[in-house]
Image: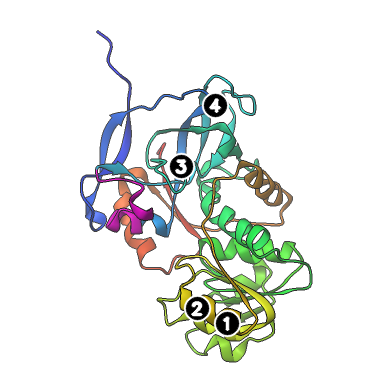
Amino acid sequence: MSSEPTMRAITQDSLGGPEVLRLTDRPRPRPVPTEVLVRVHAAGVNPVDWKSRESGGMGGLLGAPPFVLGWDVSGVVEEVGFGVHTLKVGDEVYGMPWFPRPASAYAEYVTAPSRQFALKPRTLDHNTAAAVPLAGLTAWQSLVDAAHVEAGQRVLIHAAAGGVGHLAVQIAKHLGAHVIGTASAAKHDWLRELGADEVVDYTRVRFEKAVSDVDVVIDLVGEGHDATTSRSLETLRPGGTIVAVPSGVAPELLDSARARGLNATAFLVEPDGVSLARIAGLIDEGAVRVEVEGVLPLADAAEAHRRVQEGRTRGKLVLSVTS
């Protein structure tokens, strides 16, 4: 008598600290028309993951526990549903499917619409490629689609050494911008290697005293961290734009920006296979490189969450699903 195929996955039965994460067996998903089944080789870990673990995530879109966290995946297409023409069985792909709805990436298999994936960068292994989708798309979409960065503009990137930040530095530089990053002093030399023209140690100086005449601020820190968003308005020149990624734009901040002749916009990343393909091209050309601070086995998801939650990771942490 046959049984339904299963897979390993990290689940949680309640909201809480990293200790709620546990390795279990779950039914393997099946692709419906326009979807692909991807055998996950690695899954990236992002701040939104631990925030969802604690509070349920993006406006409750994950529903009540139990659920499986994770959005970043790199793996191999194992099955294609009816109507899929962009991918085939055996393709090595990467993506950020379904965000902000559940993708359940901390697992051996995921299913999602084929056009939410792209062929992974050919120069990266799966562990490194899994670090890219959410961070890379956040960097790309905030700079290109939200801020419309142009060559010659001055761009200030907060948390420049983080998962999103280190990619944003390189993409902004590729777009021809003069790039300024905030980071602790130990990461300054590395950020200059990535292309930053100026680096400010936010632990020793108020960045708004050190930086001025900025065209675009990419705020990856948020208002809750020492009023970073509000203080960033002081760095902008008239007509400048701030893209507030983690905390959005409160009405009073929007009013303050408008009163100064500035633009302020909230931001939320979207699945985007076309942009992922462009990012893969930049990586394969050597214009963008990806920093992975560590790779842990899937069973150590709780430890990965503890490290990411400390907020001092250089680049990204990744879970190896096949190890």
Q: Which mark is residue 233?
A: 1
Q: Which element is circle 1 on?
A: helix
Q: Which of the two marks, 3 or 1, is nearer to us in this view? A: 1
Q: Residue at x 23, y 57 (%)?
A: 16
Where is mark 2, residue-wise?
253
Of residues 231 and 23, the one drawn nearer to the viewer in this rendering: 231
Which residue does the numbered mark 3 point to in the structure image? 42
Residue kind at label 3, given as amino acid type: Ala
CB contact under 8 Å: marks 1 and 2: yes
For the magenta stretch, what is the residue range?
51-65
CA gap, disc 1 to disc 4?
A: 44 Å
Q: Is residue 243 left or right of residue 63?
A: right
Q: Residues within 10 Å of mark 3 (few under 14, many from 20)?
A: many
Residue 97, magenta (yes or no): no
- Residue visible at 60% across and 61% down in the picture: 142
Could you tell me if the residues under marks 4 and 3 are in contact, i.e. CB atoms within 8 Å?
A: no
- For marks 3 and 1, the one nearer the N-term is 3
Mark number, residue 34: 4
